[in-house]
Image: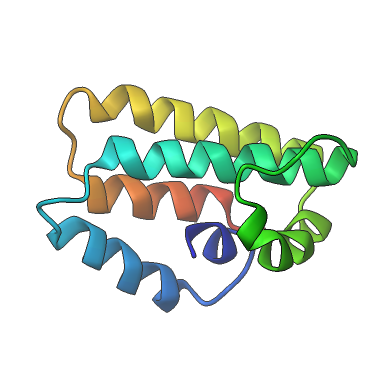
Amino acid sequence: TLLRAATGAPFGEVIRHTEAIGRSKHERLEWQLDALFDLLQDLLHLKLGTGALINEDLRSELVPLAAQVDFQWLGRAIQHVDALDALARRNIQKQIGLEALSLDLRPS
């Protein structure tokens, strides 16, 4: 959902999900970022037409996303998630971090 929001879905959609993640005491930001890294890797594989997907069960959702993004967007996304991962170790507020990530990756 964060990837869909970042590629142009209504921002209200991302707010609902980041609020749910932010309220959850069991959803660690690091786990969310690991999942995002896996999804970004899947998008890269789809763009290149190589390798098996980590999230093969999400192929039908990832194929249209891969068609929407370019390699520059993927590079930015990976850099932002990596930066957020570094900040997570400093115990940042996860909802704000995820919202900032989604805003930074939205199409202009």
Where is residue 80 shown, x and y percent of the image?
A: 49, 34
The structure residue drawn at horizontal position 39% and vertical position 49%, both measured from the top left corner, is 100
Quadrant of the frame with the C terminus: bottom right
Position of residue 56 relative to residue 23, above or below, is: above
Name the image quarter holding residue 76: top right
Where is residue 22 shown, x and y percent of the image?
A: 19, 57
Q: How many marks?
A: 0
The structure residue drawn at horizontal position 15% and vertical position 31%, both measured from the top left corner, is 91
Q: Which of 45 and 73 is in front in this view?
A: 45
Judge from the rendering whether residue 7 lies leftward or rightward of residue 24; answer left or right: right
Judge from the rendering whether residue 8 lies leftward or rightward of residue 32; answer left or right: right
Position of residue 80 relative to residue 63, above or below, is: above
Q: Which residue lies furthest to the right in this view?
A: 49
Judge from the rendering whether residue 85 lies leftward or rightward of residue 81; answer left or right: left
Position of residue 25 relative to residue 53, above or below, is: below
Where is residue 89 shown, x and y percent of the image?
A: 22, 23
The structure residue drawn at horizontal position 25% and vertical position 53%, both measured from the top left corner, is 95
Display colour scheme: rainbow
Judge from the rendering whether residue 11 lies leftward or rightward of residue 25; answer left or right: right
The structure residue drawn at horizontal position 21% and vertical position 50%, both measured from the top left corner, is 27
Where is residue 24 shown, x and y percent of the image?
A: 14, 58
